[in-house]
């Protein structure tokens, strides 16, 4: 039992000595890729890949590349675990009709016997939601500019017409 414990502590110590860059090379080595292919995938020199694999081989006390890949494959599921818990998504809830104090109907999701969550009815999308973007095409910019100019002209003419009518009413 003591031998197993010391082996596990040795494995943990060896795993912790491997750098992230060495692990990246070893991940591709496990896929039976050559140093040239690994270098191309990682965007580094072949000599750098060989140095990282050689250093990892020394850390893992392996005799060759194949044994290095075997030891790394054995250690990875044990020590390379996900740090965060997996996300559990809740099952879809049943919605129940409800009426608020104003008399408008909305849906409430039944979470349990004593808790409910209010769901607003879906809103219609605004026709102006993309108006304030800064990346409009030239055609869209021209259309927006013309629309604003025509709207301003109509507002000005309506204002002048109202002023004219009021002036005539006062002068009569």
Image: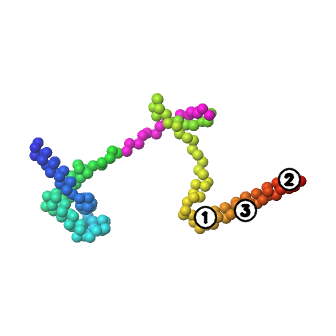
Magenta segment, which residues?
87-102
Of labels 2 and 1, earlier in sequence is 1
Of labels 3 and 1, earlier in sequence is 1
- At x 60% / y 51%, what residue is drawn? 126
Q: Is residue 26 visible?
A: no
Tell me the CA gap for discs 3 and 1.
20 Å
Residue 99, given in percent of the width and then of the height, sits at 59, 33
Tell me the CA gap for discs 3 and 2.
24 Å
For the N terminus, the quadrant is top left
- According to the image, label 1 marks what residue? 140
Tell me the CA gap for discs 2 and 1.
43 Å
Residue 166, given in percent of the width and then of the height, sits at 82, 54
Tag count in the figure? 3
Foreground mark, 3 or 1? 3
Name the dominant secondary structure of the magenta segment.
loop
Report the disc number at residue 153: 3
Report the disc number at residue 169: 2
- At x 53% / y 34%, what residue is drawn? 96
Residue 50 falls in image quadrant: bottom left
Residue 61, given in percent of the width and then of the height, sits at 14, 58
Foreground mark, 2 or 1? 2
Q: Tell me, yes or no, whether the highlighted magenta stretch contains residue 94.
A: yes
- Considering the numbered disc 1 on the image, is that residue within a helix, a strand or a loop? helix
Q: Residues within 10 Å of mark 1 (few under 14, many from 20)?
A: few
């Amino acid at each position: 039992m003591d031998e197993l414990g010391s082996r596990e502590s040795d494995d943990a110590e060896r795993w912790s000595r491997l750098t992230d860059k060495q692990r990246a090379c070893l991940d591709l080595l496990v896929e039976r890729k050559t140093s040239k292919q690994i270098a191309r995938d990682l965007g580094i020199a072949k000599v750098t890949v060989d140095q990282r694999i050689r250093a990892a081989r020394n850390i893992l006390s392996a005799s060759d590349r194949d044994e290095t890949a075997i030891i790394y494959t054995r250690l990875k599921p044990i020590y390379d675990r996900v740090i965060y818990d997996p996300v559990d998504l809740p099952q879809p809830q049943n919605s129940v009709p409800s009426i608020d104090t104003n008399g408008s109907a909305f849906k409430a999701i039944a979470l349990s016997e004593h808790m409910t969550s209010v769901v607003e009815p879906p809103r219609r999308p605004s026709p102006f939601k993309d108006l304030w973007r800064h990346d409009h095409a030239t055609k869209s910019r021209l259309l927006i500019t013309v629309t604003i100019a025509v709207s301003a002209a109509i507002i000005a003419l309506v204002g002048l017409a109202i002023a004219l009518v009021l002036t005539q009413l006062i002068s009569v």
